[in-house]
Image (cartoon, rainbow, N blue to C red):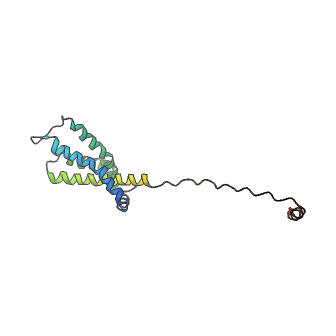
Amino acid sequence: MGILEQMRLARAHPFASLLGAALGGFVPVAAYTIVHHELRVAGQLDLWRPIAVVLLACLAFSVRTVWQWGVQSFRERAKAACLVVAVEGVMVFSDTSALAVIALVYLVGINAIATACTLIAEDTPQPQQAEPLPVPELPELPRGKAVGRIAARVRPA
């Protein structure tokens, strides 16, 4: 499913989009908060703190989704890889707050829409094969003189 189709699908399902934003959007927000508020010590990034493992998990969470969007947008793996490094890297390492927040907004949007589409796909009922209808049993016809005469006329030649 293409990016624009994902956006239309998410817009058509507001509840799934809200849940997708909560589930998919939380992770980039957590990564941003950890990097810019918990791992900064005297202006330096301290990646030796235990919370750094959570940061790595947050980054790993969205890398694949951003990669897929990059491939769909640019039709080139190299550009997709550059998009991942640029957006994730700017969000984590940029000291320019505006850039880091813009990258965060991109990541929240991408992950929210992708998660919403996954939720919608899981909720959509899949077509099931219909079971054949049972063939009703016909009642036995009485065997009398009138039935026998009619049957004799109907028999194929």
Which image quadrant for residue 135? bottom right
Please name the residue shown 33% across and 54% down the image: 19
- Of residues 1 and 105, the one drawn nearer to the viewer in this rendering: 105
Residue 17 locus on image (x, y percent): 33, 57
Residue 95 locus on image (x, y percent): 14, 48
Q: Is residue 89 visible?
A: no
Residue 142 locus on image (x, y percent): 84, 59
Would residue 42 be found to the left or right of residue 6 on screen?
A: left
Q: How many marks?
A: 0
Q: Is residue 131 visible?
A: yes
Quadrant, the C terminus = bottom right
Residue furthest toward the left? Answer: 42
- Of residues 116 and 64, the one drawn nearer to the viewer in this rendering: 116
Would residue 74 be found to the left or right of residue 96 on screen?
A: right
Residue 103 locus on image (x, y percent): 22, 52
- Of residues 46 and 86, the one drawn nearer to the viewer in this rendering: 46
Would residue 118 be found to the left or right of residue 101 on screen?
A: right
Please name the residue shown 54% across and 53% down the image: 128
Quadrant, the N terminus = bottom left
Please name the residue shown 30% across and 44% down the image: 61
- Of residues 3 and 148, the one drawn nearer to the viewer in this rendering: 148
